[in-house]
Image (cartoon, grey):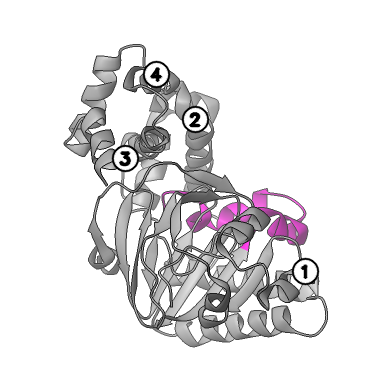
Amino acid sequence: MASYAFGAYYLPVHLWCRSRTPEAEKDIIERTPMTPKITTYNSEGFRREYFNSKSELDRLFEKSITDFFCLRIEDLMSGVLKPILPSREESHTVIVVTEGAYRTKIDFREYAIQADRIVIIPAGAVFSVDEIVWDVKGYVVHFHLNVLIGLFGNRLLISEFEFLNPGTYPVIHLGGSSKSAILNLLERLVSEFKGMHKPNSNIIHSYLYALLTELKLLLGQGRSESPSASHRTTSQFRALAHQRVKDNLKVADFAKLLHISPNHLNKSVKSITSKSATALLEEIKLIEIKYLLYQSHLTISEISYAMGYSDPSYFSRFFKKREKITPREFRDRIEKS
């Protein structure tokens, strides 16, 4: 099967990381730049770009719920046209690999994905797959946030799924008592999606919620139905950090926006991610900076100003301190690749 991103159908293709588990650490290969130009797709746009329009998959997607699908990886491969260039997608994707292996890049890190791995690709993450691998098996679940909002009626309850935020868990190990439950739910979702009639939205909602709950338990995020105060605070901070990433705000600024003290914010983030609020904020900034460097039409100074830095020299020092190379050197690597 292909090391492919199935945006609207990513194939085994990404990962995130919060504080990484030992299993996730083994999956990280290296930080390497990808090829230039990052395109953001909705589900239909991604399918038009990377899938055969005459494939049997069209019949399934025409009758499906908008912005949702669940299929076996091997079924998706029949319509794949080419490897996936650096892209962003507006929906979330969960890939479960049961056989085979492939490599993928997510948010500028390369990962080796093996059997019994779950790849979580949040909406907005930068992903790519350079090489087609045909012998991978497993499942791909793709859904827009609106699918869950349709079940809950509001966005607040969705915050319990911390792992759907960008920059959390790219790859997790599928094992233990959760494995059979997760595979069973995936089979039910595939069966409902591939049926003769349009999928029943109530059934899809229920199975999808059950699947995400199993993933939450697998990640050890607790068994309570409501997220803890620390989870809510961290989720709100992460969301704000992405929304205001170009404003160059400090942790104290976000604490003020959240009506809490900087110390409270830092303790909450640390308890959930094992990182300081500052470290998490810097990770989010670096992902956006790398995204802009890939766009290539902006100068380093223009990127500095776009990210809220008035001093391009300080901006370059910030980048080099964390990446060990300058923004210019990072861009040069892109151009040479």
Sequence order check, earlier mark of 2 and 3: 2
Dominant secondary structure of the residues highlighted in magenta in the image: helix
- Image location of residue 260, percent across then percent down: 49, 30
Q: Are marks 4 and 2 in contact (CB under 8 Å)?
A: no
The crowding category of the residue bearing disc 1, from other C-alpha atoms within 10 Å (few below 14, some 14 to 19, many at least 20), is: few
- Image location of residue 312, percent across then percent down: 30, 16
Residue 261 or residue 285, whichever sits in front? 285
The crowding category of the residue bearing disc 2, from other C-alpha atoms within 10 Å (few below 14, some 14 to 19, many at least 20), is: few
Badge nearest the viewer, 4 or 2 = 4
Q: Are marks 4 and 1 in contact (CB under 8 Å)?
A: no
Q: Which residue is mark 3?
A: 276
Sequence order check, earlier mark of 3 and 1: 1
**Residue at the right extreme of this rendering:** 197
Is residue 226 in view from this perspective? no
Q: Which mark is residue 302?
A: 4
Q: Where are the magenta residues, as a range? A: 143-168
Q: Which residue is mark 1?
A: 62
Look at 71% across and 54% down and name the residue there. 146
Quarter location, residue 26: bottom left
> Callout 1, which amino acid?
Glu
Residue 181 or residue 316, whichever sits in front? 316
Sequence order check, earlier mark of 4 and 1: 1
Residue 47 or residue 235, whichever sits in front? 47
Quarter location, residue 106: bottom left
- Image location of residue 164, percent across then percent down: 52, 56
Magenta span includes 333:
no
Give the SS element for disc 3.
loop
Q: Which mark is residue 145?
A: none
Sequence order check, earlier mark of 2 and 1: 1
